Image (spheres, coloured by chain):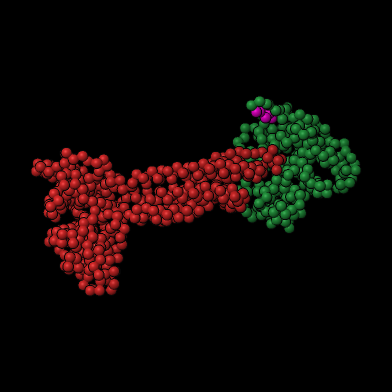
Chain colours: A green, B red
Amino acid sequence: MLTMNNLSKVYRTEVIETHALRDFSIDVRPGEFVAVTGPSGSGKTTFLSVAGLLEEFNSGEYLLDGVNVLGMRDNQRSRLRNEKIGFVFQAFNLISDLTVAANVEVPLRYRSMPASERRKRVADSLARVGLSARTTHYPSELSGGQQQRVAIARALAGSPRLLLADEPTGNLDTQMARAVMELLEDIHRDGATIVMVTHDPELAARAQREVHIVDGQVLDLGKPARLVLSSSEDASIGAA
Amino acid sequence: MIGYYVQLALLGLRRNVWLTLLIVIAVAVGIASSMTAYTLLHTLSGDPMPWKSEKIFAPEIDLIDPNFKVPAGTRFTLMAYRDASAVINSRQAERQTAIFGARAALTTEDPSLQPTSTPVQANHSDFFGMFDVPFSAGASWSREDDESHARVVVLTQRLADKLFPDGKAVGQSVQLDRRSFKVVGVIQDWRPWPSFYNLFTDPAAVHAAGGPQLFLPFETALEIARRTAAASMRFHGGYSCLTRAPPADAGFEGFVMNSDCIWIQVWVELPTAADVNRYRRYLDGYAAELHRAGRPVKPPTRVRNLREWLVYNKVVPDEIRIASLVAFGFLMVCLVNAVALLLARFSRRNSELAIRRALGAPRSSLFAQCLIETAVIGAAGGILGLVLTFLGLTAERATLPRELVRAAQLDVELVAMTLGLAILATVAAGLYPAWRSSRALSAYQLKAQ
């Protein structure tokens, strides 16, 4: 689903050169739930930006769903991002002056999709996250957990092959975080490929595989020993 | 997508209200100043008869004493009576008319009406056909009337309504110099701008009264002037002597009929290029005759068509051209300010644009979204600019010379142009900010939310 081989990403200024990713290789298989961990400044966000086609890389190879993205023009990259990737951010990143429904509709607007199809997808996505009754609300009228669920609905609306989540529970209290995590696990069980950046070892433990990044390089920890996917939150955490 | 962008732009107007308002004001003030100046310039420099201006000509013979120092900027556009009369009587053109302006004491047979000083114009019958003057009743007098010095007049609808409220002016009589003149026609409201046909024979005072209200045959008017020695009819307009001026006791004949001083505007209609060439040869020949007769003719003669004549006579004053340039310069300054404000406005939108980008919007879409938002702001600036333009034109009407007041009008064309220019100028100002914002990204902005 997502394959990076010997990829490097360098940020240059007049005085300094920062190697954010070096010889970075990773392979995420379809349907996999991968947690990406690492200390601050290790390159997690850069990895997510490159994986999400938000930034280009300097060398190496990146195949997204079998498509080599090297040399693609902006329009092609944007279309690929729109069709294949869903983003969930720590800060939710909802557009404050759009309603819940309009926010969820945003990625669909960049496809030539009929209005009726858009409306159906928005309704389905919001139903999936349990927010059908909040379509006309504005983000500021929702709790943090609800906002993150709207963001997940927005990511799901486009039926992406890959969900990239950057600290999705980082701004939430424990109860809300648990609910959001359960939602992600539900989505994964339905077949979605998820790559989630997190600082939280407990959340990382709930993924199928943990990839640790240090100084822009991958240290693949493989399947967390503690991981037991279970229908029960306690069983999952308890198994750790 | 355009509908979606417009919808977003309208939503966006509510965001950063004060900043948006500042941009709207900057655009509106720039647009209003330039459009106010442009209106005047456009009206003054317009072709008053675009369908015919290439066929109407002003012949010119310069009568200048060799010892006379001609002031810089002097325009030779009028003729002396002797020459105007000769040119008209030669019948070298399809139509020809001589024109001078005056004011005359006018009454009717109704004893209750007091004599009123009325702006009048003396011209030949061809004047009406040459300038396509529209009649609402009756018609022009004839060439025979010109030659026989007939006592006939044509009234404007305004004067006809005033003198004959029952609505039947044609066939009635008016009194000039205690003589009865028959009304043969009434013309509709016809006030071409600029008032080119009598630019120098119809001074501001006459024009401010709404242009000439009564037209009468050229020679008939001269007869009245001669007979009444200016008691019943006073000449109005330019009277220039670039030769030795007549002695003070020269009287009417010396000053008006036989002098080399110029005061009559002559127009001729020449439909084809061959007609124009033939007329040039005629005028050259006539000037040569004058020279042989000892008249102070300074070659060459000229035959300028209406557009050339307007340019030559600087119908658009240099001050107005300069004011227009300054106003457009001011618009540029306002737009530079708008660029800075738009940069500030869009920089506040970077996070939203970054979100859209992450969700699949290509840079071209974000660029289009920003530009359409700019266009909507421009339209708002245009609407406010229209209000300010209206106020500017109102102020202009209060300060301009009266003959220019009519130029300061807000019409449909100006409204469309103001809105169009506002949108175009704002979009132009928004190009760089929109481009910059459409490239703004990325994960860091999303993370920094």
Depth check: B134 or B222 in front?
B222
Could one spot residue B91 in this view of the protein?
Answer: no
Residue B434 lies left or right of residue B272; in this view the side is right
| Rendered location of residue B175, percent (x, y) | 20, 68
| Rendered location of residue B194, percent (x, y) | 31, 52
| Rendered location of residue B220, percent (x, y) | 16, 60
| Rendered location of residue B236, percent (x, y) | 23, 55
Main SS category, magenta section? strand
Does the magenta portion include A11? yes
Residue B265 lies left or right of residue A138; in this view the side is left
Res B410 → quadrant = bottom left
Q: Give the range drawn in magenta.
A: A7-13
Q: Residue furthest left?
A: B293
Tell me what residue is drawn at x 27 percent, y 42 percent. B73
Q: Which residue lies furthest to the front in this view?
A: B248
Tell me what residue is drawn at x 41 percent, y 43 percent. B325
Tell me what residue is drawn at x 70 percent, y 56 percent. A137
Tell me what residue is drawn at x 79 percent, y 34 percent. A38
Res B190 → quadrant = bottom left
